[in-house]
Amino acid sequence: MTNLFSIFDPSTSSLLSLNWVSFSIPIIFLPLSYWLSPSRWNIIFKKISFYITMEIKNNISNKSIKNIIIFFSLFWMILMMNLLSLYPYIFTTTSHLSTTMILAMPMWLSLMLYGWMNMANHMFTHLVPLSTPMMLSFFMVLIETVSNIIRPITLSVRLTANLIAGHLLMSLMSSIYENFQILFPLLSPLLMMLTTLEYAVAMIQSYVFITLTSLYLTEIE
């Protein structure tokens, strides 16, 4: 492999082009309630859904409980894209800022518009923390404004950077095995451990994304 970053190229082979298939594969998981006896996937789906629902409920207030479906859907969308990107010939959509920014920017912008249009005074109070000296108030307003503006960027970069780092490590170890097959007994367990770690990272980053977004909603209430 001449370039490790070629794995993030959305143009795959013309014989097997599956670069955006991660958006359509979750459709096969939709008819889960058709069977009387729940499958293992159905049980896992319900357990994760229950846990995520309870976590979001703990982060938001009662009057915002109707918005829980937005965070719930966003979690599963990001999780599916992260998990399916670990399979061969499937493009890693969340490794591109163009994808993660599309997810983060509308959520942040809608929260800001809602807060400033309905609770402007409350939003202004967040710009100056409690017990801030008068001399530092102006600088604190600037700092809080900048930290608020970069929130969608940090959400996007955090998700993208974690996925890029893991995929680069897997690609590097695979290229080493391709050139030095004698190292297979050593690299095979490492690749299995790294793949398991990537599955964990995919789930954790999805959880972090929706948790921070729900906390941003809590701040403006």
Image: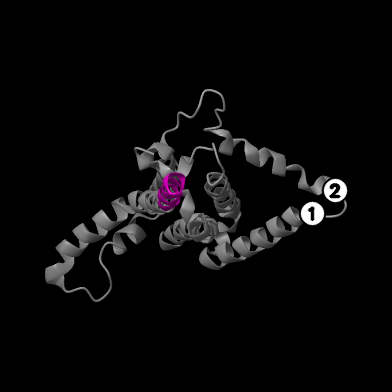
Residue 60: where, in percent of width, then height? Answer: 52, 63
Image quadrant of residue 16? Answer: top right
Quadrant of image for the C terminus: bottom left
Residue sitting farthest toward the top: 14
Q: Which residue is mark 2?
A: 35
Residue 116 visible within the image: no
Prevailing secondary structure class for the magenta stretch in the rendered image: helix
**Residue located 30% across and 52% down the image:** 150
The reply to whether the C-beta atoms of the residues labelled 2 and 1 are less than 8 Å apart is yes
Compare residues 91 and 72 and report the one nearer the observer: 91
**Residue located 24% across and 54% down the image:** 146
Residue 13: where, in percent of width, then height? Answer: 50, 27
Q: Is residue 60 magenta?
A: no
Image color mode: one colour
Image quadrant of residue 122? Answer: bottom left
Q: Helix or strand or loop: what does disc 2 sit on?
A: loop
Res. 92 mark: none
Residue 88: where, in percent of width, then height? Answer: 55, 40
Residue 220: where, in percent of width, then height? Answer: 41, 59
Q: How many marks?
A: 2
The amino acid beneath tag 2 is Trp
Q: Residues within 10 Å of mark 2 (few under 14, many from 20)?
A: few
Res. 39 mark: 1
Compare residues 109 and 88 and report the one nearer the observer: 88
Q: Residues within 10 Å of mark 1 (few under 14, many from 20)?
A: few
**Residue located 16% across and 62% down the image:** 139
The amino acid beneath tag 1 is Ser
Instruction: Give the side of residue 34 with respect to residue 129, left or right.
Output: right
Residue sitting farthest toward the bottom: 131
Numbered range of the magenta stretch: 169-180
